[in-house]
Image: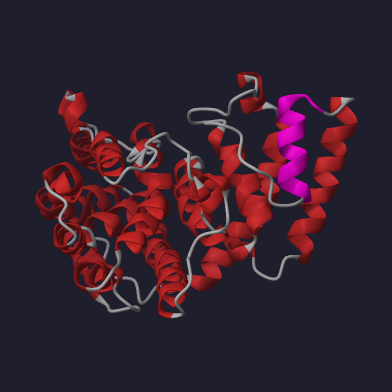
Amino acid sequence: MKQPSPRGEASALLLAVMAGTVDPAGDALSHLETVVEAAVSRTPDILLDDDLQLTLFCLYELHYSGIDGVNDEWEWNTRLLGVRQRIEAAFEARVRAEAVVGALPDATSEAVCAELFRMTGEDTGPSMSRFVAKSATADQLREFLVHRSISQLREADPHTWAIPRLAGRSKAALVEIQADEYGNGLLARMHSVLFARTLRELGMDDTYGAYLDAVPAITLASNNLMSLFGLNRRLRGAIVGHLAAYEMTSSQPNRLYSRGFTRHGYGEPATGYFDEHVEADAVHEQIAGRDMAGGLVESDPLLLPDVLFGAAAALAVDTLVTAHIMGAWEDGRSSLRPSEAMAA
């Protein structure tokens, strides 16, 4: 991924440290720790803090495809891990305050699945999929894709961290879901590849991270949430619940998204990504609810609260993303940040 533009003192200093443009590194790392501590302490809402969310996103990116000009050795630098953990602690606390979990069901597969379907079936705000299907302009379709590009061009990767953390029935179910996400070994069927094709059909850049500078903090927070859950073993229940919530809220919205692109005259090369999810996720939601999430809880009942928290967190943060986008569109303005990528 190319280096993003800084959004404040913390992200600017982190990128400079990792690129080696500040010296000496030891003093710069100490300064980074101080800057991040101050930023965390004073932020009114970390979910909406562009500087801290970008800083956390870049720290997580070290575990994915990396950042241009940044040595891979930074991935396990203990000082940077400490900085990441400081932001993570505040981020997780804020998400826990936002996510609502009801009474715990029995620790059985069927009860867990039923509760997840109840949670994901509740109407929590405006529907972006219905708006896209009926009303979105061509420019709004592109904005929608920009927000989605941050996650969909590496689709499945954050949830894949959970595979070695699970065992038995839940692990087998997760692998089955992820195999579909990765195209069952066929490059052209990988969901990230299908999404890239959609971008190209609309004349957009399909490079991972191309639109990172354009998305707001809440979009980064939605992506950072997956990495928080996936990269911390203690939150393995949460990443399973997160994926279950995604699979259970995917099929019908993607049908509507496809309809919106068709309404603007786009054919299968643009709609194929969404059409694929209509079919695949109708199957995945059952596997995710009963076998992956339910199977995990049956094998370890102590993880039940974490599974439901992960689902609630996914729903809550994505509701905030939708509210941000829909609020901007209702006001007749862009939901994106000014950036060179969108000006091109």
Residue at the (74%, 42%) spot, across then down: 12
Work out whether residue 239 or residue 186 is closer to the camera in this orientation and state it: 186
Q: Position of residue 43 (x, y in %)?
A: 73, 65
What's the colour scheme? secondary structure
Q: Position of residue 221 (x, y in %)?
A: 52, 56
Q: Is residue 132 above or below residue 163?
A: below
Q: How many marks?
A: 0
Q: Position of residue 238 (x, y in %)?
A: 41, 53
Work out whether residue 313 or residue 126 is closer to the camera in this orientation and state it: 126
Residue at the (61%, 20%) spot, across then down: 72
| 340 relative to 104 in the view: left or right | right
Q: Is residue 238 visible?
A: no
| 287 relative to 229 in the view: left or right | left
Prevailing secondary structure class for the magenta stretch in the rendered image:
helix
**Outermost residue, front side:** 344
Q: Position of residue 327 (x, y in %)?
A: 45, 77
Q: Is residue 88 magenta?
A: no
Q: Is residue 335 above or below residue 291?
A: below
Work out whether residue 308 or residue 251 is closer to the camera in this orientation and state it: 251
Residue at the (52%, 31%) spot, across then down: 1
Work out whether residue 56 or residue 228 is closer to the camera in this orientation and state it: 56
Q: Which residues are magenta?
A: 9-21
Q: Is residue 6 visible?
A: yes
Q: Is residue 79 above or below residue 48?
A: above
Q: Is residue 12 magenta?
A: yes
Residue at the (43%, 35%) spot, across then down: 208
